[in-house]
Amino acid sequence: MKQNIVIVGLGLIGGSLAKAFRACGGFRVAGIDRDESVLRAALACGAVDRAGTEDDIRNADILYLCLYPRADVAFTREHLGAIRPGCLVTDTCGIKSWLCPRMAALAGERGFVFVGGHPMAGKEKSGFAASDGGLFRGASYILVPCGAPRWAVDRLKALAPKLGFSGTVETTPAEHDRIIAFTSQLPHALACAYVRSPQCPKHNGFSAGSYRDVSRVANINETMWTELFLENRAALAEELDTLIRHLGEIRGAVAAGDAETLRGLLRTGRKIKEELGE
């Protein structure tokens, strides 16, 4: 029997989820998006079976919220009466400490089950046009139970390999946000600061892999990332302080012409990467 999947927000992640579900079969996929042209494109390429309605939400086995954090909560509140008790609701947001308590409260009010989710996959480009059914291939899928019953977490874990994920990680909202501040948010902040150098427009002919690696994620959705940064401000500010301190140490050694200290700082970075085996 086919499962009913409803995906709210057919951007890069939502559109890629829709395509991944359709590719593996056994699911009926309804898509909801406020942009009619996106819905038409998703229907035309077969990413979704139909444009989602309130009835689709009522019949959903799994409801994926693929909007910004505040929009996820707003959509859930707006359609709370249509989400049936027992429905499994999950999200794809990059922050959890702000989102999970609000979604758990709504779940308790209505009787649906909420499990936080975060696919560790993406591209520099956003929107449905950039979506790809193979986006999650080899990626990690973070699950944040938020007090949900074991069956709900296990259900999403069982779906993960079908969608292409190589594995799942379970964690708490606080731990998720602490680590994501380092692995995801800090690199985006660094890239945006890096390309603001007056030398950046002159890089053609002088750049190779190092420039591409550091600058790649500066191609950013500033509206979404502003929300993510500010809802995780304490953890991100701490990581920024650490980075600034370490850059200051290198700058100090360079400015002083202190080769011994500089070698030591660079050696420390190299050894950390070597010990991680990456």
Image: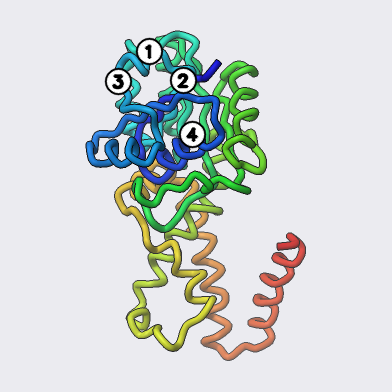
In primary-sequence order, the first of circles 4 and 2 is 2
Foreground residue, 193 or 113?
113
In primary-sequence order, the first of circles 1 and 3 is 3
Q: The disc labelled 3 sits on which kind of residue?
A: Thr
User: How far, Cα to Cα, is label 1 from label 2?
Assistant: 10 Å
Task: Give residue 93's position: percent from left, percent from top.
Answer: 44, 38
Foreground residue, 128 or 205?
128
Label 2 sits on residue:
4
Q: The disc labelled 1 sits on which kind of residue?
A: Arg
Task: Give residue 273's position: percent from left, percent from top.
Answer: 70, 66
User: How far, Cα to Cα, is label 1 from label 4?
Assistant: 21 Å
Label 4 sits on residue:
22
41 lies above or below 272: above
Q: Please give the name of the residue rendered at 59% of the width and 47% of the height, measured from the top-left corner.
A: 137
Is the residue marked by circle 3 packed among few (<14), some (14-19), or many (20+) residues within 10 Å?
A: some
| Local secondary structure at mark 1 | helix
User: How far, Cα to Cα, is label 1 from label 3?
Assistant: 9 Å
268 lies above or below 225: below
